[in-house]
Image (cartoon, rainbow, N blue to C red):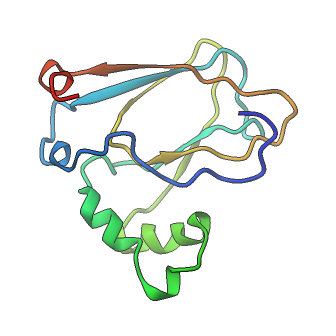
């Protein structure tokens, strides 16, 4: 990710609705690795705490509405957060060697990279055996 001026829409990486009825253990987790500094200007990931158990259908319904039809995904976010009772979105700056471990159901998105360097954030995904057999 390099020299971007827009936010990535908030999203989840696990799209199977049935995965949201299982609280723990999560079906899948991902580890994101910082290989260089990721400051607030370098496009850090945004995370929405405690969203891993919000059913996909509920979130999709909350993002619908006539007044939101022509809104960009970033313009929709305050409405979505209010409808779902979400209080905060956290930016996650990182230093080389830092690892961000998250449930793949957690709502997240990228931020603009205002720097000139490409921001690399490689990841490794870990799947529960029962989930891996479904994919």
Residue at (61%, 19%) from the top-left corner? 34
Percent across and percent down for residue 73 are: 56, 64
Residue at (45%, 50%) from the top-left corner? 11
Q: State left or right for residue 128 relative to residue 70.
A: left
Q: How many marks?
A: 0
Percent across and percent down for residue 85 are: 35, 68
Q: Is residue 18 above or below residue 61?
A: above
Percent across and percent down for residue 37 are: 72, 22
Going by the picture, which residue comes out furthest to the bottom?
66
Quarter residue 13 falls in: top left
Q: Nearer the viewer, residue 100 or 5?
A: 5
Q: Nearer the viewer, residue 19 or 50?
A: 19
Residue at (20%, 22%) from the top-left corner? 132
Q: State left or right for residue 95 relative to residue 134.
A: right
Q: State left or right for residue 104 relative to residue 7.
A: left
Quarter residue 58 falls in: bottom left
Q: State left or right for residue 134 relative to residue 127.
A: left
Q: Nearer the viewer, residue 47 or 27?
A: 27
Residue at (70%, 29%) from the top-left corner? 38
């Amino acid at each position: 990710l390099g020299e971007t001026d827009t936010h990535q829409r908030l999203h989840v990486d696990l799209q199977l609705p049935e995965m949201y009825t299982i609280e723990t253990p999560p079906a899948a987790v991902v580890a994101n690795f910082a290989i260089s500094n990721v400051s607030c200007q370098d496009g850090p990931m945004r995370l929405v705490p405690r969203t891993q158990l919000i059913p996909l259908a509920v979130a999709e319904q909350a993002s619908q509405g006539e007044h939101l039809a022509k809104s960009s995904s970033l313009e929709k976010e305050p409405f979505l957060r209010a409808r779902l009772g979400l209080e905060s979105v956290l930016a996650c700056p990182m230093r080389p060697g830092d690892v961000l471990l998250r449930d793949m159901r957690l709502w997240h998105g990228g931020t603009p990279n205002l720097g000139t360097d490409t921001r690399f954030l490689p990841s490794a995904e870990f799947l529960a055996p029962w989930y891996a057999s479904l994919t």
